[in-house]
Amino acid sequence: MLNSTTFFPADIKTGCAGCSESVKLPFSFSYAYQPIVNIASRSVYAHEALVRGPNGESAYSVLEQVTDANRYRFDQACRIKAIKTAAALQMPSMLSINFLPNAIYQPELCIRSTLEAARTHDFPINRLIFEAVEGERVEDGLRLTEILREYQRIGFLTAIDDFGAGFAGLNLLANFQPDIVKLDMDLVRRIDQSPARQSIARAVIRMLDEMKIVMIAEGVETQEEAKCLAQMGVRLMQGYLFSRPLFEACGNADEIMWPHT
């Protein structure tokens, strides 16, 4: 069980070149937060930070402006903005932030601005989850493993997003065991109607249980999907069935649309 103590590693003192430039971008953006819920306890486990335009415009309106030249600065600015906004909302749950593996140069140094943001806004780092998107082609799988291990060493929780959809998959799990794996929404979609999807999900659940990795089913949209997953033992879920992303706001248990499982 995580406590609420704010911990900042003493050995992270300097950043790599560019950290001081991390918030200087030619475009603005903000965040929406989507709850990740525990259907067993009917509580909010975490909120995933999802990038949006400054007035709630689509993620695409922001991401289309990200280039190779500003990718690193955007990744750094995202972390700072997500933490700052969550702190202002007094978010009581954990906060999950997506990061771009190909935008990390030296993980032990590039993390400095994240730690400074957490310290400035008094957001405990043991309530931060960093999600690596498995669907993004990572140039070096061992490099991604190095980044995730360093994040764990510092005290962050780590997650593999979109598991089953991308380029890392089982090979990544063989080399590194994250705290959390998020089952891709394409496997969740109509799972109640698909014996094949159910078999795959059961195998993944069993494997993750043996490895002591938490699983989140993402993209849950129907009562039937939630019921099917619950019968398999899945407790953490995310999707439109429970709540759509909330622009510059976070949800609480009283506002969640709980399934009839």
Image (cartoon, rainbow, N blue to C red):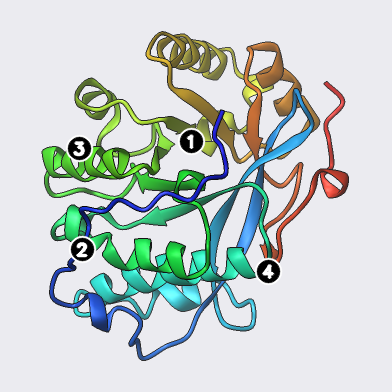
Please give the residue where the numbered disc 4 appears in the rendered image: 247
Please give the residue where the numbered disc 3 appears in the rendered image: 145
* Placement of 61 over or under 45, stated as above or below: below
Disc ID at residue 184: 1
- Residues at discs 1 and 2 in contact (Cβ within 8 Å): no
Q: Earlier in the sequence, mark 1 or mark 2?
A: 2
Q: Label 3, label 1: how many angstroms apart (C-alpha)?
A: 20 Å
**Viewer-side label of 2, 3:** 2
Viewer-nearest residue: 89 or 51: 89
Quadrant where the image shows the C terminus: top right
Residue 191: horizontal and vertical position, in percent? Answer: 62, 24
Q: Earlier in the sequence, mark 4 or mark 3?
A: 3
* Placement of 252 over or under 72, stated as above or below: above
Residue 15: horizontal and vertical position, in percent? Answer: 18, 68
**Amino acid at circle 1:** Asp
Viewer-nearest residue: 82 or 244: 82
- Residues at discs 2 and 4 in contact (Cβ within 8 Å): no
Please give the residue where the numbered disc 2 appears in the rendered image: 13
